[in-house]
Image (tube, rainbow, N blue to C red):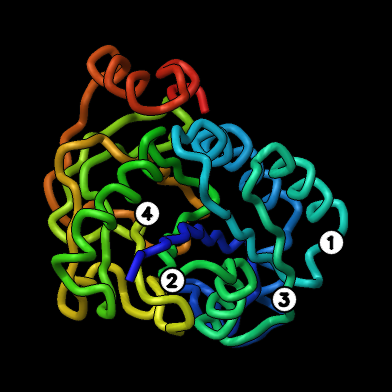
Amino acid sequence: MKIRNQIIGLMRFSYPSKGGFVKAGDDPEAQARRLYDPARLERRFDLFEKLTLPSLLAQSDQDFRMVFLIGRDLPDVWRDRLADAIAPLAGARLVALVSLPHYLAVRRAYAMAEKDNATHVTGFRLDDDDALDIHHIARMRATVEALLPVTGPELPLVTGCHRGFFLERKPEGNEIFEVVEKAPIGLGLAMTTPKGVSENIFRRNHRFANQWYNTYTDANQPAFIRTVHSDNDSDPHASGRIEKVDWAQAGPVIEAHFPFAAEMLKAL
């Protein structure tokens, strides 16, 4: 069988799911107030427009779809801003759903982006305040093509990375840390399955992916920038080695792998 692998990214852009949040309670109205607070959304857009979206637009392999999952009740001013921002991204698709259980919502969103002629789907995850290196999609495609015949085309295959940077935003000045995770990080993590299989990368806690699936993560490439700030839903800590580096040292590496100048990140 000739494998035709489709790559689909999924971003939950302040989607008010039932479950899926660490800090949210069970009251849907309280959750909506928190997610749709104008000051919070302005902060999210600031990171998305300066960090996350540019990293997607700069991908050397543009043959992927990117689903942006939002709530149907997201106020028009924010929905329009998001639609305008992602318009230059060729594979962008805005999906608006009512509040659903978290995993059901992401399953529906992925399914709405699948191509009819694909035999396999590689679905990856990305938050709206993080960035991928410019060759992330190309490397993902090559890795899956190399490993799928070995692991078996009918079995789930998880691929990702565990080397990158944490960017800590601080009033007194941003700091940068180089990290090498010892467990799979969710940022850019992907699962490949035959098309039509409902299981996807959100099914299990990403830290424990290798307990459930054949898992390969790249330790060589600086593959991500994760931001650490007051709006993080989960506790943003590295599960492995973390080392503070100065901007002069980190700058050339960042600028070689990401579409950013170090000075921009320093002032972000």
Q: Which residue is mark 3?
A: 97
Distance Cα–Cα, label 1 vs label 4: 27 Å
Query: What SS does tag 4 mark?
Result: loop
Residue visible at 49% across and 50% down in the picture: 230
The answer to which of marks 2 and 1 sits earlier in the sequence is 1
Tell me if mark 2 has few (under 14), some (14-19) or many (20+) residues whose alpha carbon lies within 10 angstroms of its own. some
Residue visible at 43% across and 67% down in the picture: 121
> Residue 100 or 143: which is nearer the viewer?
143
Asked if disc 1 and disc 3 are in contact, CB closer than 8 Å, the reply is: no
Q: Which residue is mark 4?
A: 187
Residue at the extreme right: 76
Distance Cα–Cα, label 4 vs label 3: 23 Å
Distance Cα–Cα, label 4 vs label 2: 25 Å
Select label 1 or label 4 by which is in front.
4
Distance Cα–Cα, label 2 vs label 1: 37 Å
Say which quarter of the image contains residue 113: bottom right
Q: Which residue is mark 2?
A: 119
Q: Position of residue 200 (x, y in %)?
A: 41, 75
Three-letter amino acid code at the position of disc 4? Leu
Count of all numbered marks drawn on residues in the image: 4
Q: Which residue is mark 1?
A: 75
